[in-house]
Image (cartoon, grey):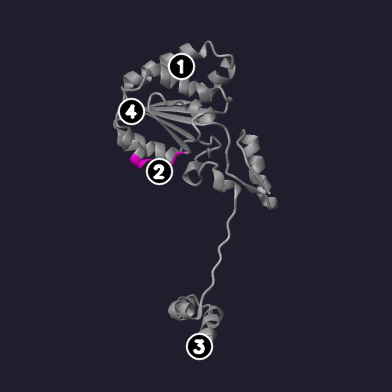
Amino acid sequence: YKIFGPGNQYVTVAKQLATQFGVAIDMPAGPSELLVVADDSAVPSFVASDLLSQAEHGVDSQVILVSTSKKMIAAVEQEVQAQLQVLPRKSIAEKSIANSKLIYVDNHQTALELIDEYGPEHLIICTENQDFYIDNIANAGSVFIGNYTPESAGDYASGTNHTLPTNGFAKNYSGVHLDSFMKSMTFQKVSKQGIQSIGRTIEIMAEAEGLQAHKNAVTLRLSSL
């Protein structure tokens, strides 16, 4: 059996506990995360709406803005407060926002290093030098590129799966995809010519590991040829 799907911190812990009883899981996928990296080319109202789109999930959601522009940070903070007032889930979102971060960095390299260390579930890139991040980012569950690519698109319509690793697990896991629902086996058949070709290599490696029976399984076959 294999359990699929995201959830809150209780679901994540339950899935991890289930693995102790022979049940597989897709990945640890807990409370929602979103990191937006933005410079002065971003649209503050768009960025604020993206941050709130994850904040409204739950009080334990985390949203982060990383920016090379103090002006952008100030504008986004103002927009967040304005948009927050009209949300039906305001009480939830504002608690999440209270635990979230607006981070100023001097340059894009520092921003990249921070993002990779954090390993966000969702990463939105709203910068002029998008290709810098696209070419160099290593740890993120799903990446959204440009001012007109909200995280909501990934949730509902753009085609990517939004069951994604959280809590830094983007460093170790990928999001759910078709292969997640399958398992594979390997098959091999070695001919007489094949064992003659690779046999000596196997013997040397087995002997180096001190596994004499491994070596013998090959040596006996080579001796029979």
Identify the residue under disc 3. 225
Q: CA distance from mark 4 to mark 2?
A: 18 Å
Closer to us: mark 3 or mark 1? 3
Closer to us: mark 4 or mark 3? 3
Magenta stretch contains residue 181: no
Percent across and percent down for residue 38 are 36, 26
> Residue 93 occupies which quadrant of the picture?
top right
Type of amino acid under label 3? Leu
Q: Earlier in the sequence, mark 4 or mark 2?
A: 4
Type of amino acid under label 4? Thr
Q: CA distance from mark 2 to mark 3?
A: 50 Å
Type of amino acid under label 1? Val
| Magenta span: chief secondary structure | loop
Label 1 crowd (10 A; few <14 / some 14-19 / many >=20) = many
Identify the residue under disc 2. 138
> Residue 105 occupies which quadrant of the picture?
top left
Percent across and percent down for residue 133 are 35, 36
Percent across and percent down for residue 119 are 45, 39
Q: Are marks 4 and 2 in contact (CB under 8 Å)?
A: no
Percent across and percent down for residue 159 are 50, 34
**Residue 127 - label:** 4
Identify the residue under disc 1. 80
Residue 98 lies left or right of residue 36; in this view the side is right
Q: Earlier in the sequence, mark 2 or mark 1?
A: 1
Vertical placement of residue 127 versus 219, above or below: above
